[in-house]
Image (cartoon, rainbow, N blue to C red):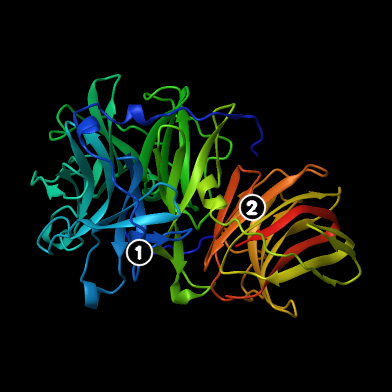
Amino acid sequence: MERRKFISTTSQAAALMPLIPASSFFKRKSPVDTVLPEISLDTPHEFHRSLFYKPVNAWAGDFIPLFAKGAFQLFYLQDWRNREEFGEGTPWFRVCTNDFVHFKECGEMIHRGTKAEQDLYIFTGSAIEAEGKFHIFYTGHNPYFAALGKPQQGIMHAVSDDLEHWKKTGEPPFFAPKGNYEPNDWRDPFVFWNDDDKEYNMLCAARFNKGIPSRRRGLTALSTSKDLIHWQVKDPFYAPGLYITHECPDLFKMGDWWYLIFSEYTDLVRTRYRMSRSLKGPWIIPSVDDFDGHAFYAAKTASDGHNRFLFGWNPTRSNQSDRGDWNWGGNLVVHELRQLANGELTVCAPKTIASAIGTPNPLHFDIHTTTGQITAGGNGVQIKAPGTFGAALAGEMPQRCRIETTVTFDKGTRFIGLIFRASHDFENAYFVRLDIARQRMVFDKWPRSKSEIPFMVELERPLKLQPDTPVKLQVLIDGTVGVVYCNDQVAMNFRMYDFRTGRWGVFAEQGAAAFSQLQLCS
C-alpha cells in the first residue's frame, strides 16, 4: 500500500457454515510442494512472544501471508521511523508462526533499492508457490521519480528456492498502461493461478485518470500471464466508482463464494470485501462489508487448509497519545474468518490466541453508583440503574490479559459494557460501550477533549442488540493494543495510550443488566 499517515475522519445472525479449504485455488502444483523441507519452529530462543506482533525497535505494516512449510509465513513492510539511523525506504522482513502468539524472526527478505532505483520503498505485494519456486510480486516505489517524469510505482518480481534467500529477477518493472490509468498508482499486486482460464491473474490497486470525480477513481485492475513474466492488462476486475483506491487486494474462494478484499480510506478507513459466485462477477456488497474499524487496516488472508485467517495491523498514534493522529503501521492483529449461511463473512478471535492467556484471576468487585442497585458475587454482577449509572470495579488490569463475559439486559436499557484501566476515583477510564438505542458497539474514554463526541472517531461497529438476548464479549489486551469481539462475529480494534494502568469492571446506564461468566485471565 501507499505509505502515508492516517488522519481521523468523521447484523449479522445466522448459523455458521464450516470453512472450506481454499488454498488449492492459489497454488499451482509444482515440485516445490514436495521437495522443500518444513521450517522448524522448535528453537525457543528464536521466538518473539506477543498477542500483537511488532518488530523490536520498529513497526510493521501490510502483512503478506503465505502458508508454506507447515507454518504461516508473514512477510511485512518494516519501518524504523528513523531515517537518520536506518536510511530511507521500507524493506520486506518475515516472521513465521503456527499459533499467532509465538513468532520466529526470519530477518530481511527483500532489501531496498537506492534513490536511483525503482524500489527504494518495497511496498505491498503477494507471495506464491509456482513453477518450482517461491515468487514474490511487490511494488517498487520511488517518490523521487515523479520529478524526473518517471512513474513512481511499478510492479517487480523476486524468486526463492527456500523462502530464506530471495533474488530480484531484474525484469523491467511492470508499469500502469498509458491512457486511462494514473501512472503513479499501480501497486499491491496479488497474483494467483486462475484454473478456469489456465493462466496467472494479477490484481492490483490502480486509479483511472479521468472520467469521474478524483476521489472515486479507485479500481482493482486485472492483468494476465502464462509465464509470470509477461503481463497483459485486461478490463478492470472491479471498478465501482466509490473509493480513492482499492489498496492491498486479496482474493479467495470459500464454499460456493468468491471473496474480494481490499482496503480504502475515502469516507472511512476500512478493510472491505465483496462476494460473488463467479470470478467474472457481479460483485455483491454484503449487508456489513467491513471487518473492523479504523484501527485495523491493509488486511490480507491465508488458509492452512482448514481455517482462513485475516492479517491486518493496528496503527500507532502520534506522540503515543489517544488524541494523536493515526499513523501508518503498528502491530499485527489476526482475525479468524467464518462464513454465514448466506455467504457473508464474520470474524472471531483465533483460538490459539485466546487460549494463550489462560490463568484466571480472583474477582473482587467494588460498587460505583449513584442511585442504582448492584449485586456482585462469584463470577457475576447484576446492575439495576433505572435513570442513572451503575458500575462495579474489580482489581488492577494486567498489561496482557483476556476478559470475557456474557451479558443480558432489560428492555429500555440505554448502555452496557466493560471498563478498562479506571482510576480508583473513577475519574479516568476507557469503555467498550454497547449503545443499544443506536445498535452499535463503540470505544470511548473519560475524560474526553472538548471537541470529542461520545466515542473515539471511527471506533464503532454495527451490532444487533435485543433485550433478554445474551451478548458474549471477549477482549484481548497487550500493552497499548486491544481488540474486542462480540458474539464471535464482530470485532473492533483500539489503542490505549493515556492510561497505562488501572482497574477493570462492568457498567450499565439507564436500565438493568446481568453480567455472567465473568473472568479475567492473564
Q: Which picture quadrant has residue 477?
A: bottom right
Q: Amino acid at mark 2?
A: Gln
**Near-viewer residue (148 or 355):** 355
- Residue 55 is tagged as 1
Pointer 1 local density, CA inside 10 Å: few below 14, some 14–19, many at least 20 = many
Residue 514 seen by the camera: yes
Examine the rendered structure and indicate whether residue 486 appears above or below residue 370. Answer: above
Classify residue 144 as left or right of residue 273: left
Marks 2 and 1, Cα distance to the nearest angstrom? 26 Å
**Near-viewer residue (522 or 72):** 522
x, y (%) of residue 505? 73, 65
**Near-viewer residue (112 or 132):** 132
x, y (%) of residue 442? 64, 57
Examine the rendered structure and indicate whether residue 105 appears above or below residue 317. Answer: above
- Quadrant containing the C terminus in the rendered view: bottom right
Mark sitting earlier along the chain (2/1): 1
**SS at mark 2?**
strand
Q: Residue at x 18, y 40 (%)?
A: 177
Classify residue 111 as left or right of residue 472: left
**SS at mark 1?**
loop
Residue tagged 2? 474
x, y (%) of residue 392? 79, 67
Q: Residue at x 51, y 56 (%)?
A: 294
Residues at marks 2 and 1 touching, judged by CB atoms closer than 8 Å: no
- Residue 294 is tagged as none
Classify residue 343 as left or right of residue 164: right
Q: Amino acid at mark 1?
A: Pro
